[in-house]
Amino acid sequence: MVDTRRQGLKGGARLALFLVSYVPLFLILIIQQLYKYSEYLRWGGLDSESVFRFVKYFGAVSVLATASLLGLIGLWLLIRNVSRRAQLSGDAVTIIDIENKNSESISYLFTYVIPFVFQDLSDPISVLSVSILLVVTFLIYTNSSMLLINPTISMWYSLYQIEYIEHGTEKKKKGMILSRDKYLEEHDHVKLKRLGHRLYFSTDLGGES
């Protein structure tokens, strides 16, 4: 028998969500670095000095730009797939209590993103410090309800804490859901697809019963 409590997103999908949550930070760092060291943007050929200069001043931001792009592509694939699966095989439920949790993304932004903003990515110690903190945050992020707390996704989706009843049962359950519907209310019917422990993607089934 399959233990449904262990079902959820694979490692690649979790990594994509984490990277996307840091896209605002990565964009700020890239802009800062390009502006601060713009005089080194002139390419002088493939000599060792030019290569060293590029790696020193723009190596880290190149990695961040690549990570951001991969994260956004991964997010697009994830949302497309999980939305389709929710429609086809999601669990139909009725919401009986709901609380908007979008403010959690603001807390995440200031707690986990803003402290990195003033780092100089041409300094190896700063790069190492940022890398260690990102790895630690990733390990915490992907093993907790923070998986759905995402400033980037919150620009298009809403995060809710809900209590619900599965159709055909009277058992009440609780969970956190990500929904495109910004106006979900009690008694709304939705379909849920599992993303993690008590974490779900939601698609709308209709209005109030």
Image (spheres, rainbow, N blue to C red):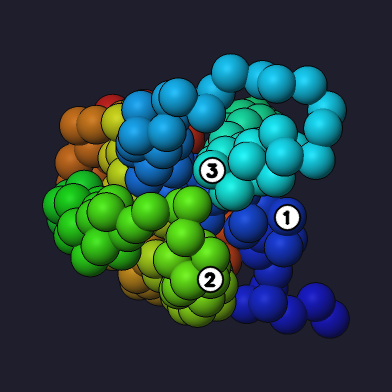
**Label 1 sits on residue:** 12
Distance, label 2 to label 1, CA atoms, is 23 Å
> Residue 170, which numbered label?
none
The crowd level at tag 1 (other Cα within 10 Å; few <14, some 14-19, many 20+) is few
Q: Which mark is residue 57?
A: 3
Cα separation between marks 3 and 1 = 29 Å
Is 8 drawn above or below residue 159 in the view shown?
below
Q: Position of residue 87 (x, y in %)?
A: 61, 33
Residue 169 position, x and y percent, is 47, 65
| Amino acid at the residue labelled 2 | Leu
Of the 4 image quadrants, the one containing the C terminus is top left
Earlier residue among tags 2 and 3: 3
Q: CA distance from mark 2 to mark 3?
A: 14 Å
How many residues crowd around disc 3 within 10 Å: few (fewer than 14), some, or many (20 or more)?
A: many
Q: Amino acid at mark 3?
A: Tyr
Q: Nearer the viewer, residue 94 or 126?
A: 126
Q: Which mark sits nearer the N-terminus, 3 or 1?
A: 1
Residue 142 figure quarter:
bottom right
Amino acid carrying label 1: it is Gly
